Each structure stands twice: as C-alpha cells, then as structure tokens.
Amino acid sequence: MSQTPASPTAASASMATATTALARVAESLARQGMMQHLGTRLVSVGEGEVTLAMPYSDRVTQQQGGYHGGAIGALADIAGGYAGLSVAPEGMEVTTVEFKINFLNACQGGELHATGRVIKAGKRTMVTSAEVTHVADDGRCTPCAVMQQTLMAVPKTY
C-alpha cells in the first residue's frame, strides 16, 4: 500500500512549524544561564520532541566523579520542557509543575543526551517524558535516567 505524498502546502506548513519550534527553543536555551554554565547544547528539535546534550566536566560531577543527579535532573527537565515549548501556542512559555525521575546507571566521561517527548498536550497542562542516555567516548550508549513531568503553559514575559 503506497502513501500519497503530502501536498506542497502541507509540507511547507510542517517546515514552517519545525523552523518556528527550532527558533523558539534555541532562543530560550540561549537565555538559560544554568544550562549555558553546564555547557548544554541543542541537538535537534521536532514537533513535540527535543534532544539536548551535556558534556562531562567538573561543573556536572559529584564527589565520586560521576554525573551529579542534579545535573541529570536539570537536563531531563529542560529537555521535557522544550518538547512542550515546541508545541505550545505562540506567545506562551512552559513551566514545570512537577517531575519524577529514576536514575538507572551512574556514568562518567563522554556526554549525556536527553530526549524529551510530549505525551499529552492538554488545554491547561502537558505531560512529557525524557530519556537520558550516556554516550561514552567510544560511542557506547547506556541508559542513565528516565523522567516524567507535568508542564503548565504561561505567558511569555520577555
């Protein structure tokens, strides 16, 4: 069974939405002092999905040399939040109402990748999830943490 290609108008609208989401997320990330301090960078943005990366450094470690749970939690929170922002109405931002995280493995070196995904975008709140994966210097990937959160849309104030 073949699929009919999307109309040029639909394809253009989809590209415009992706471009707008990318611009919104990139602009917001540039304003995040903590994420800038930790070296977080934007990897990809799609409708309802965002991936961020955080390199290993002494800014993100705990006393035993592994990634600190606070850094992992912050990365997961921001990835889920930006997934929500990518589908939020124009002129709105999102803020975290709550999140729950499970730490799966302790990791050192390499970098962390967090992919946030919108599970349900409602009128008042959104539910998102994030998977954090450790990418070792040799390319091996290890699950690091999983998170689920609730977001609320709020007016953009800047």
Image (spheres, rainbow, N blue to C red):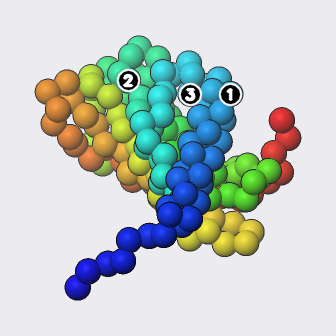
Q: Amino acid at mark 1?
A: Arg
* In contact (CB < 8 Å): disc 3 and disc 1: no
Q: Horizontally, is 73 left or right of 95 in the view? A: left
- Where does the image place residue 51, in percent across and percent down from the top left? 43, 43
Q: Earlier in the sequence, mark 3 or mark 2?
A: 3
Q: In terms of secondary structure, where does tag 3 sit?
A: helix
> Residue placed farthest to the front in the image?
8
Quadrant position of the N terminus in the picture: bottom left
Q: Quadrant of residue 27?
A: top right
Please tell me which residue is depicted at 44% across the width and 23% down the height of the picture.
60
CA neighbours of label 1 inside 10 A, class few (<14), some (14 to 19), many (20+): few
Q: Horizontally, is 65 left or right of 120 in the view? A: left
CA neighbours of label 3 inside 10 A, class few (<14), some (14 to 19), many (20+): some
Q: Which residue is mark 2?
A: 55
- Where does the image place residue 84, in percent across and percent down from the top left? 60, 55
Q: Is residue 71 above or below residue 91?
A: above
Q: Which mark is residue 52?
A: none
Please tell me which residue is depicted at 63% across the width and 27% down the height of the picture.
30
> Residue placed farthest to the top in the image?
58
Gap in Å between the C-alphas at discs 3 and 2? Answer: 11 Å
Gap in Å between the C-alphas at discs 3 and 1? Answer: 9 Å
Gap in Å between the C-alphas at discs 1 and 2? Answer: 19 Å
Camera-nearest residue between 64 and 131: 131
Q: Which residue is mark 3?
A: 35
Q: In terms of secondary structure, where does tag 2 sit?
A: strand
- Where does the image place residue 87, in percent across and percent down from the top left? 62, 59
Of labels 1 and 2, the one closer to you = 1
Q: Horizontally, is 67 left or right of 35 in the view? A: left
Camera-nearest residue between 23 and 129: 23
